[in-house]
Amino acid sequence: MTEDKEKSSGEGHRVSTHEEGVNMPPDPDAHRTDEEKAEIDRKLVRRLDLMLIPWLCLLYLLAFLDRTNIGNAKIAGVQDDLHLTNGQYSASLSIFFVSYAVFEPVTNIMLKKYRPSIFIPIIMVLWGATMLGMGFCFNWDGLMAARWFLGLTEAGLFPGVNYYLSCWYKRSEFGIRAAIFFSAAALSGSFGGLLAAAIENMDGIGNRPGWAWIFIIEGLITVIIGFISFWMVHDFPDDAKFLSEDDRARVVRRLKLDQQASAEHETFQMTYLYQSLRDWKMWLGMVIYMGCDMPLYAFSLFLPAIIKGLGWNTSTVRSQLMSVPPYAAAAIFTVVIGYVADRTRRRGLCNIVVSAIGVVGFAMLLGSNSPAVQYAGVFFGALGIYPCIANTITWMANNIEGVYKRGVVLGFVIGWGNLSGVISSNIYADHKTGHGIVMGFLAVFLFGGSILMTILLRRENGKRLRGERDHVVEGLDEKQIEGLGDMRPDFYYTT
């Protein structure tokens, strides 16, 4: 186990002394040349990308649109029409994150148990129906109930899809896919502004105000897409119906050769939960993710109001439209950072550099009264927040091994990050206070936490390279060593 020491300490992977791991399926391409195998592999990955990524991006675009469109509804008059105080409006934002965070840690276990092709479409239909119902709220009580159930039903999508994709792709392929998937959140900001501007023109139809139609139309779209998803969402690699038997074997083999336990079937045991709770990487990952997730929701929920407050215009529609360019820039930059992080395997460094851009952006918002400078600060803020979400999740997934352990850790990390959304809902009583708190989260938790994580992972990799962890596997057979996951001494962390 200890003789292979030639691996790079910057890459989260295991290098084993054998190529054929435990329960490796037969190679359907054993008779082919290396060039032929490489070409088959490229075509297989392209097919996976085509079958998985576009539809999942659409689902997350709808999810993020549905959770943040209340910001568009605010400047369209929902607060005035429902006679909400500022405290009541903030509470209606906060309650979403409470139910979302509470139910999120268990959703990956449910996804594994009930299959993605069943679990994901069901929660989509439920949250779409909830969103549609928000268009028929007449008071604060109704809005609070709807936002609670929206958080509950949406809780399974983001952690579930990231976990799901990590079970399809090699570690060196996952980052760019997670970035493309999450860029749908930024695109939803652009699309949401445009859609809200158009839907507001329905004001008065059916005796419902424009903000109500924002909820109704977007909820109806989600319900329809949810039903279609019963045929468009696929199960895990070893049971995917769109693949031939040979292609399923190829996917499982490439995952196992990447030394991923996601290629294996596991039965859930409480041991996986205990392993997760004892893992320091989960707790530090929660801190880092909180450092980008709270700013994400503060930015998404209040951007239309922030732009309206710049004083450039008096038109609600123009405020909606001016929120489009920052989101579009963030979507592009998210994919760029995902590509760079995959190629360099330096996810910590990417987080550090990108979060510094965000700090600069919010410093511009805080330090200047010029609308032009502040609008530029909005761009830098978006560029400094969005890429870190996908990069942090990918970083955690790269460094956690084991099907259920990875699912539990991602659930806790993402759930804790979303719980910080309660903070984001209550910090913009005035813009200066809100900008200062967001900048503090970016600087302390995201920037500082990423530096600490990088240092600790590099230190641990050094110990494993020097053989200081080899005693962990003494006296264990291959199956027991496999069960150690990321604790085995030949697993090297992505830094």
Image (cartoon, rainbow, N blue to C red):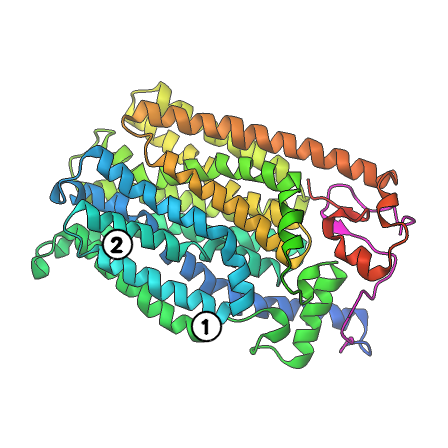
Instruction: Say which quadrant the C terminus sits in.
Output: top right
Q: Earlier in the sequence, mark 2 or mark 1?
A: 2
- Give how far across and how far down residue 356 sits, in percent: 52, 29
Q: Amino acid at mark 2?
A: Leu
> Is 257 or 338 nearer to us in this picture?
257
Q: Residue at x 75, y 47 (%)?
A: 487
Q: Which residue is mark 1?
A: 232
- Magenta region includes residue 2: yes
Chief SS of the magenta region = loop
> Is 120 or 301 nearer to us in this picture?
120
- In which quadrant of the rendered view does residue 227 lie? bottom left
Q: Residue at x 38, y 34 (%)?
A: 423
Name the disc covering residue 447, or none. Answer: none
**Residue most extreme to the right:** 3
- In which quadrant of the rendered view does residue 208 lie? bottom left
Q: Which residue is mark 2?
A: 195
- In which quadrant of the rendered view does residue 166 lie? bottom right
Q: Residue at x 28, y 59 (%)?
A: 130
SS assignment at label 2: helix
- Give how far across and how far down residue 429 sits, in percent: 27, 28
Question: Which region shows up in magenta?
Answer: 1-28
Is 229 displayed left or right of 245 in the figure? left
- Give how far across and how far down residue 254 sits, in percent: 72, 65
